[in-house]
Structures are given as structure tokens and as C-alpha cells.
Amino acid sequence: MGCIACAIPRFIRSTITVSPPLKLPFQILCRRTVSASVYPAPRLSEREEIRSTELVAREYADLNLSDKFCQEVGHVRIRQHVNPLRSTLMVPVEVPDWNGVYDDPTLPLMVDIGTGSGRFLIWLAKQNPGLRNYLGFEIRPKLVRRAEYWVNELALKNIHFVYANATVSFKQLVSTYPGPLILVSILCPDPHFKKKHHKRRVVQKPLVESIVESLVPGGQIFVQSDVLDAALDMRDYFDAESHKLVHVDRINPDMLCDNEGWLVNNPMGIRTEREIHAEFEGSKIFRRMYQKQW
């Protein structure tokens, strides 16, 4: 089985005491710590010369992803809000053949829920071949097809994307994975602003319980949003699992938080596309990271 120590960024390295004492040294995951102070919102004169889409291209330039896609994928237009409760998304997806999906299905697994274009997860997979596997959940099928096209183009054997509603399919898929689940990220999910649509938000009690149950001790959960109400909602759900989860700043003083308990820095080493767009517009990113105690 792959080592959990390969899963988490260097500065999240911590010692967790259980009974008997257990120490989990975490190896670096990413190339850099990212914070809003590193990427301040451009001044007006700069805004006239650059667009946030260009900043995304710069952030992911080393992937060298092709702008030409197979005919089946065609032009991809992102629909910002999708109703996850529609009937076609309420059926669990078929469990893949993990031996066919990954070169080594026993490696530690990171799951990204609501993976969008997939660039964020593809970048991580390219940085860590042979160390861990990556699984992305996305409910917009064209984005999944394009992400898989990029994966094939880069010949990556440690990453897979599924067209699925994570609320419905997470437990079924992850419970069959042969290796340990060491990290789950939910980054800038659809906020579904209207109160009557809050039931469509991806972070709900059943998914939270499935994530906590599936994580190995020492495994982590990273959530963030540029919408405060959505971030507070996610925080409340995971704070309710305090008997099993602890926020990382309580076990690692290097993980700095502001006065309201939000992480100051992005611990993943690269920003998501939504994060880039939001910071370009001057928005704050609200982040939390939890670690399972036992």
C-alpha cells in the first residue's frame, strides 16, 4: 500500500497523538504556498491590459495543454450552476476497474469534488507520478470528456475523472478503491445563492459523513470558496464532526489563520481557476483544512 506520508504539503507536516501514539510525517505535495498577498488584484491600468483568463493560462502554462480537442468534445461552454438533484444525476455511477484506471491502484488517493475543467487536479497528478492517484468528480459531462482528453494527451496514469454527482456516488466509488484515501478537496463549489436552492449545494451531511468515514487517520479535507455564505455553510458541516476532525491550525502553528479562523494561505501550491478569477476581481478566498484524528 502507498505511504500516507507522500500526500500532504510539507508545511502541513504534523504529529498526531492517538492511543498508541502515531506519528505521520507528511512529504511535500506542491511547489509553493499561494496566498492572496502573493497575487494581489491588478491595478486598473493592469486590468486594461490583462484578463483573468490570461492569468489562468499563465498559472497552468507548464501543462502545455492543447487548445484543440477531439471532435467529440468540441467547444466547451461552462454552465455555472447545475441542478445536482435532477433524476439523471441521482443514479450512482458504475464503479470503474481500478486496475484499468491507474497503473497502481494501491497508491494513496486524493479526491477533488467539483473538479471543473480539471486543470488543478491534472497539475497535481503531473507533479506526483508514482506517488499518489487522483480522482475528480464533475457533473458537467463535457468538462469530464475534455479533462480525460488532456489526461490521455499527457499520458498520465495516476488520474481519472468521473461524470457523477459526488453526493450520490462518492461512498460507492471510494469504498471500493484499494488504496487509502488521504485527501479530499471541495474548492469553490456552486454556491446556489437562493435559500430554496441550498439543498443543491454539494456539501450536505450525508456527503460529509461519507468523507470523514472514508478518510484514513491523518487524512485531510480542504474546502474553500469566494462566497462567504457558502464557505460558512461548509465550515459548519465539517465543524460538526469535531469528534473526529480537527482544524489544522490546532496541530500545526505554521498554518496561519485570520481572526475569523480562515486559512491565510492556499496550502496546495497552485490556485484553481475560480480562485484566480475571484482574486483578480479583488474577492477574498475563505479556506479551511481539517485533519482526521482517528
Image (cartoon, grey):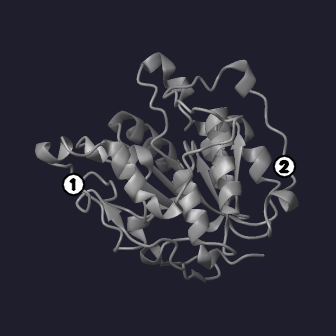
Q: Pick the quarter of the image with the N terminus.
A: bottom right
Residue 277 sits above or below residue 200 on the image:
below
Inspect the image, locate mark 1, and give the three-letter code of the amino acid beneath it.
Answer: Pro
**Residue sitting nearer the eye, 86 or 195:** 86
Residue 35 sits above or below residue 128 on the image:
above
Residue 262: give its label: none
What residue did someone put label 2 on?
96
**Among the 4 quarters of the image, the one containing residue 169:** top right
Residue 239, position as x, y percentages in the image: 47, 49
**Residue sitting nearer the eye, 238 or 186:** 186
Inspect the image, locate mark 2, and give the three-letter code of the amino acid beneath it.
Answer: Pro
Residue 249, position as x, y percentages in the image: 38, 66
Q: Which residue: 48% across, 16% down?
A: 196
- Classify 10 Å Cα crowding around label 1: few (below 14), some (14-19), many (20 and above): few
Q: Pick the quarter of the image with the C terminus.
A: bottom right
Please identify the residue farthest to the top as the structure is shown. 196
Q: Which residue: 26% across, 57% down?
A: 39
First of labels 2, 1 by sequence position: 1
Q: Which residue: 54% across, 61% down?
A: 123
Residue 208, position as x, y percentages in the image: 60, 45
Q: Can residue 208 be seen in this view?
A: yes
**Among the 4 quarters of the image, the one containing residue 158:** bottom right
**Residue sitting nearer the eye, 261 or 82:** 82
What residue did someone put label 1 on?
40
Q: Distance between the residues labelled 2 and 1?
A: 42 Å
Dot 1: what SS?
loop
Residue 92, position as x, y percentages in the image: 79, 35
Horizontal side of residue 216 vs 97, given as left or right: left
